[in-house]
């Protein structure tokens, strides 16, 4: 209750950190960014529950062993640092199927809801079979699950914000709907939340999506910061 409005941003450029000779990773990931403004309200809307956890022993199944986010553009100069994403796909899949399903179920239970009360599942877009497994745990048909993995690949932290935007724009969610968000990632970590949707104010004169490519937008922002 400290702030009336909060800007939440999810963005990643994972194509910078994949080895394009490694077909087990390079074909899976994409770049993306999404954001949402959360506003306090006296209406019965907002966050009903949250779940967050991590299994640190599983870090070795999904990580960047080299410099990570500090990798230089000319990474080839320092090949010994192996600044590329390393993933054990079999172990990550096994973990994600269980973790996302368990987290989603726990979030619904903590919210005091039944599975039948859920109007839409908006999952992290990593793998269609993982998404389907989470939906089945909630007894949801796939018409109540937003999937855009086929368009963007796995955009990591950006995947849920992008999916939320698309679902809202498509008219698939409305004021008062109960939404489940669920994700997993490096760490290995997992999270889920149940949100009672409060709708989006319509501002016809304000664009919803920037047409500026992510790389150009990031470069412009960094350049401005360095010049200040």
Image: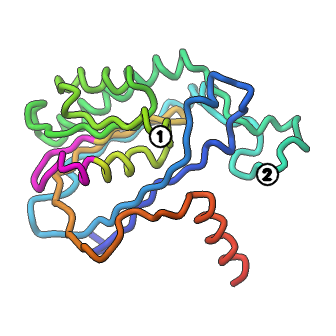
Closer mark to the observer between disc 1 and disc 2:
1
Could you say where residue 29 lies in the image, as x and y percent from the top left?
A: 56, 36
In the drawing, does residue 55 fall left or right of residue 166? right
Could you say where residue 10 lies in the image, as x and y percent from the top left?
A: 46, 54
Q: Which residues are magenta?
A: 167-180
Crowding at dot 2, Cα within 10 Å, few <14 / some 14-19 / many 20+, comes out as: few
Q: Which mark is residue 73?
A: 2
Image quadrant where residue 14 sits: top right
Name the residue rendered at 50%, 42% in the picture.
156
Which residue, given by chain and number where applicable, does mark 1 sit on?
Answer: 152
Q: Nearer the viewer, residue 89 or 168?
A: 168
Task: Answer whether labels 1 and 2 touch (C-beta < 8 Å).
Answer: no
Name the residue rendered at 40%, 60% in the picture.
35
In the drawing, does residue 30 fall left or right of residue 41? right
- Is residue 177 found inside the magenta-colored segment of the image? yes
Q: Distance between the Cα atoms at labels 1 and 2?
A: 23 Å
Name the residue rendered at 51%, 50% in the picture.
32
Which quadrant of the rendered structure holds the C terminus? bottom right
Which quadrant of the rendered structure holds the N terminus? bottom left
On screen, 127 above or below 211?
Answer: above
On screen, 133 above or below 181?
Answer: above
Q: Nearer the viewer, residue 13 or 103?
A: 13
Helix, strand or loop under label 1: helix
N-terminal of the pair, mark 1 or mark 2, is 2
Q: Which mark is residue 206?
A: none
């Amino acid at each position: 209750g400290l702030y009336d409005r909060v800007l939440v941003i999810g963005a990643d450029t994972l194509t910078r950190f994949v080895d394009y000779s490694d077909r087990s990773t390079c074909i899976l990931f994409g770049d993306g960014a999404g954001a949402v403004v959360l506003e306090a309200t006296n209406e019965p809307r907002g966050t009903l529950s949250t779940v967050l956890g991590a299994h640190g022993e599983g870090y070795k199944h999904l990580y960047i062993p080299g410099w990570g986010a500090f990798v230089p553009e000319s990474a080839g100069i320092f090949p010994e640092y192996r600044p590329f994403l390393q993933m054990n796909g079999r172990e990550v899949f096994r973990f994600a199927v269980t973790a996302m399903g368990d987290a989603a179920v726990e979030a619904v239970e903590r919210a005091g809801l039944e599975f039948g009360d859920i109007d839409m599942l908006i999952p992290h877009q990593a793998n269609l079979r993982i998404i389907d497994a989470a939906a089945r745990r909630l007894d949801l048909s796939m018409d109540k699950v937003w999937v855009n993995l086929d368009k963007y690949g796995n955009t990591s932290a950006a995947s849920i914000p992008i999916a939320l935007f698309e679902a809202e724009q498509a008219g698939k969610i409305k004021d008062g709907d109960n939404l489940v968000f669920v994700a997993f990632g490096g760490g290995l970590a997992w999270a889920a939340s149940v949100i009672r949707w409060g709708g989006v104010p319509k501002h016809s004169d304000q664009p919803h999506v920037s047409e500026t490519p992510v790389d150009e937008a990031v470069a412009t922002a960094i350049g401005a910061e360095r010049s200040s």
